[in-house]
């Protein structure tokens, strides 16, 4: 094999999707070692420390995904106008469990007005406060937050942080992403370093990275 052929072979290997690769050749993190999760992984290239690129099955959105994130079949669904991607991440050292859910909608009337979608999300979460609003990379982002207490009062870490809201592309009237993230201390017998600011920053990193195919430059 000459140098040119070797380069072509190497390029072919780099272009292969993670789901088509042997697990032994993939990064030794949950996002790639879990068979169901790596179906969504675009590349083995780390985009930011601890994050890789996820693409929905509809190919309508991409976003940063944590390296220890694991796809949840029970929280996921895929149909013509709706795709739900549920996943968990457990940080053993910090004893923090994150449950995440991203729902992509397309072609539904309630998407045409952001205020209508926000009313729906507020109703689901029994939320009456204002949302933090941001505009970034051709998207409009709304962020809501609640601290909730569990019914089990005997539990030491008796609370969770919840973040929810909506991400809408500026280039489309009838699509968007609803999201929900919950952070809790998993094991009550271990110390837990759950911090609201750290949790919020993690959520903002992921939802701010959402890219809609309609916003891509031709």
Image (spheres, helix red, strand yellow):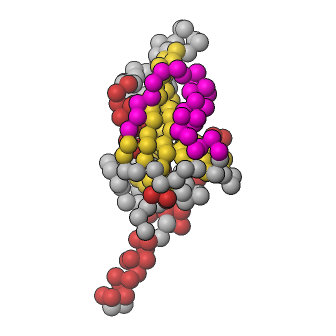
Q: How many numbered dots are placed on residues in this image?
A: 0
Q: Is residue 127 magenta?
A: yes
On screen, residue 156 versus residue 201, left or right, reads right
Residue 191 in the image: x percent, y percent? 39, 20
Residue 134 in the image: x percent, y percent? 38, 38
What residue is shown at x 40% (from left), y 81% (from top)? Answer: 9
Q: Is residue 95 in sight in this rendering?
A: yes
Q: Which quarter of the rendering shows the N terminus?
A: bottom left
Q: Which quarter of the rendering shows the C terminus?
A: bottom left
What residue is shown at x 49% (from left), y 63% (from top)? Answer: 18
**Which of these two is toward me, 202 or 130?**
130
Q: Is residue 90 in sight in this rendering?
A: no
What residue is shown at x 63% (from left), y 41% (from top)? Answer: 110
**Which of these two is toward me, 56 or 167?**
167
Quadrant in which residue 142 is drawn: top left
Q: Which residues are magenta?
A: 109-134
**Furthest residue to the right?**
79
Quadrant in which residue 199 is drawn: top left
Q: Is residue 111 magenta?
A: yes
What residue is shown at x 43% (from left), y 21% (from top)? Answer: 190
In the rendered view, tell whether residue 192 sits above or below residue 66: above
Residue 8 in the image: x percent, y percent? 38, 83
């Amino acid at each position: 094999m000459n140098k040119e052929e070797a380069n072509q072979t190497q390029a072919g290997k780099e272009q292969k999707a993670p789901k088509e690769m042997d697990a032994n050749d993939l990064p030794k993190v949950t996002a790639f070692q879990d068979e169901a999760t790596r179906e969504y992984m675009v590349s083995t290239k780390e985009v930011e420390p601890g994050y890789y690129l996820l693409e929905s099955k509809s190919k309508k959105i991409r976003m940063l995904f944590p390296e220890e994130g694991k796809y949840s079949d029970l929280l996921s669904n895929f149909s013509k106008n709706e795709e739900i991607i549920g996943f968990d991440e457990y940080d053993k050292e910090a004893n923090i469990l994150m449950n995440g859910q991203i729902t992509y909608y397309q072609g539904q009337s309630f998407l045409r007005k952001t205020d209508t979608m926000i009313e729906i999300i507020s109703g689901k979460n029994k939320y009456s406060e204002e949302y933090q609003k941001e505009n970034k990379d051709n998207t409009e982002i709304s962020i809501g937050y609640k601290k909730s207490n569990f019914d089990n009062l005997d539990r030491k870490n008796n609370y969770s942080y919840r973040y929810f809201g909506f991400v809408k592309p500026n280039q489309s009237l009838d699509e968007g992403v609803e999201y929900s993230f919950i952070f809790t201390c998993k094991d009550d017998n271990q110390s837990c370093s759950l911090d609201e600011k750290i949790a919020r920053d993690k959520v903002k990193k992921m939802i701010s990275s959402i890219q809609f195919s309609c916003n891509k430059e031709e």
